[in-house]
Amino acid sequence: MDTGTGIYVPEPTFFIPPASKEHNLLTPPSDSDAQANYAPHLARPGTTGLALLGSAGEVVHLARTERVAQIKHMRAALTAGGYEDYPLIAGTATNGIEETMELLNESAAAGAGWGLVLAPGYFAAAKSEEGIIACTFRTLAAHPNIPGGKLSHGDISIHTQIALDPETDHSKFHLFTGLGQQLFPALQVGCSGATDGLAAILPKTVVRSHNLVTRTEAMDQETLDRVRELQYRVSHAEELIKFGTVGVKVAVARVLSFGEPDGGRLPLARGMGSGRGGVWK
């Protein structure tokens, strides 16, 4: 499997909701059974890998022991399902270098092959030029242990400047969009795929869109029309992702029957609430 290109799925973390309204459980336990069944379901359509413990995975609500346990559980479930070498990317973003390194090492020992990190942003206004120069994409791309990056904004011009930078070896460093609604244009300007929330709900559709573009040498009109149709559907469905983790979890529960639509940890809103669930009516 080529781990440099394709569709990665930011997997939500499932929790067991309180048994009743009277049962006020602020930190419900993880639903390990739902998680174990969900992972092979995402791998089956041909997605490239899973991104665990990011914002979609409610990582801020998880203790470090829970993070490690989830990675181990996902690796075991995938292996049992016949996906032993399926890539796992673990979120390890903190605002400190030492803690990030600790999380990277813990995640690797638990079964993750890669870590997802961020440039520290807490003191964004006080960063010095010297403090951020080592975080430029061109510098990161030259590092042998950094295979790629993801941009979760809609500026295609910035995607283009990074994905087509002539001073970057794009056989070793791959740029991904974090927005499935711009998958087609992002692929056209050199991006390698997407880490997209909608892939957690409709993995076959997102993978099909990617494959039609990247595995067609000369795109005829029929293929182009099909790609445009799929992109329209993806872009329309991506409206759910505007609700973030909440929208993804509600959709996963109602469309795929994994987890519970109200299975978040407080203070995250449980369910999409009145007036925001009309799309499901």
Image: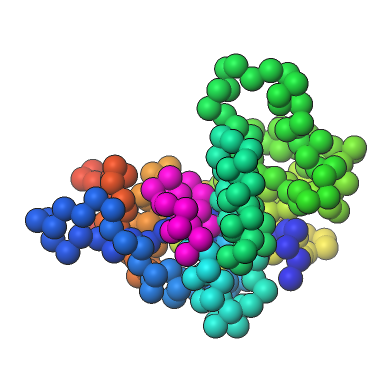
Q: Quadrant of residue 36?
A: bottom left
> Magenta segment: does it hold 62?
yes
Query: Where in the figure is residue 224, as x and y percent of width and height?
Result: 69, 57
- Magenta residues (range): 52-69
Q: Is residue 161 left or right of residue 31?
A: right
When the figure is inspected, residue 33 is found, relative to residue 115, above or below; the finding is below
In-front residue for pair 249/58: 58
Q: Residue at x 60, y 16 (%)?
A: 126
Q: Is residue 254 left or right of residue 106?
A: left
User: Could you tell me which quadrant the N terminus lies in?
Assistant: bottom right
Q: Residue at x 51, y 76 (%)?
A: 77
Query: Where in the figure is residue 23, as x and y percent of width and height?
Result: 13, 57
In-front residue for pair 78/198: 78
Q: Residue at x 50, y 53 (%)?
A: 53
The answer to whether residue 153 is visible is no
Q: Quadrant of residue 128?
A: top right
When the figure is inspected, residue 234 is found, relative to residue 1, above or below; the finding is above
In-front residue for pair 99/271: 99
> Magenta segment: does it hold 85?
no
Instruction: State the scheme by which the image is colored.
Output: rainbow
Q: Report the label total.
A: 0
Q: Residue at x 64, y 20 (%)?
A: 127
Query: Where in the figure is residue 163, as x and y percent of width and height?
Result: 78, 42
User: Could you tell me which quadrant the C terminus lies in?
Assistant: bottom left
When the figure is inspected, residue 194 is found, relative to residue 122, above or below; the finding is below
The answer to whether residue 139 is visible is yes
Q: Is residue 199 left or right of residue 6?
A: left
